[in-house]
Amino acid sequence: SKAQRMFAAVPLLSAAQQASEGLVWLTLDDPGHATLHRIAVRLFLTFAVVVWPSWLPLSLLLAEREPGRRRPLALLSAWGLGVSIYAASLLARWQPAVHVVGHRLGYQYSVPSGEILHVIGYVVPTLVPLFVSTERLARTIGIALAGSLVGTWVIQRQALTSVWCFFAAILIGLILFAVSRERVPAAA
């Protein structure tokens, strides 16, 4: 439906984000592609820390049919917008860096406050809306994303951004299933 288009676009945006990380890998140790590498790193991080905190809650707000759920989703959207603006300002001021951690990528960009506060500030608008929304499979996606975040934090904390985004990309495939199962009302 028209109200679900932004939510339905999440898998497409996630694919673009994963493609940008593919470019990061391909240009990682190639001085001849240093400019492309910097662009790919910024693009990946723009999706990861700027787009998702505002896109996800707003897309669920627009798709929400239950009036009682719209207000909390609007508040989470506002929170997400604040997180996105903050993250965009960090990316604009400092050159992010990436390095290989084991067989994964570890991204570094300046986070002046404590790391845990940054993660909590990010997680609230990216995960909580999935538990507030009445969209099909939203809660299931939320539980799976929360589990993957905890697992990533415990096992691959140095590569948290990359690894959690990878799990999210796989789990976001559930959105395709959820949206494809929705029935568009017939025109009157």
Image: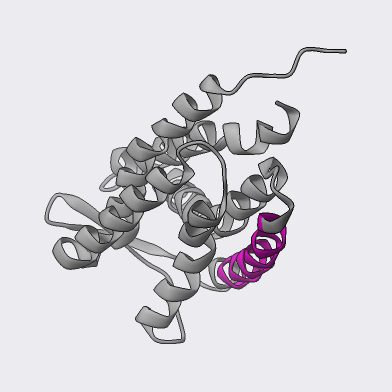
Which quarter of the rendering shows the N terminus?
Answer: top right
Q: Quadrant of residue 3?
A: top right
Furthest residue to the bottom? 113
Residue 135: % across, % down:
56, 40
Residue at coordinates 52% horizontally, 31% vertically from top-left?
12
Tell me the magenta residue range: 69-89
Residue at coordinates 66% horizontally, 34% vertically from top-left?
4
Magenta stretch: includes residue 74: yes
Furthest residue to the right? 188
**71 or 156: which is nearer to us?**
71
- The colour scheme is one colour
Residue at coordinates 63% horizontally, 70% vertically from top-left?
79
Relative placement, left or right, of 2 versus 38 is right
Q: Main secondary structure of the magenta part?
A: helix
Looking at the picture, does residue 85 appear above or below residue 3?
below
**112 or 129: which is nearer to us?**
129
Relative placement, left or right, of 62 versus 172 is right
**55 or 62: which is nearer to us?**
62
Q: Is residue 95 visible?
A: no
Residue at coordinates 27% horizontally, 52% vertically from top-left?
163
Looking at the picture, does residue 173 appear above or below residue 28?
above
Residue 187: % across, % down:
83, 12
Q: Is residue 166 visible?
A: yes
Residue 148: % across, % down:
27, 53
Relative placement, left or right, of 97 versus 53 is left
Magenta stretch: includes residue 71: yes
Which quarter of the rendering shows the C terminus?
Answer: top right
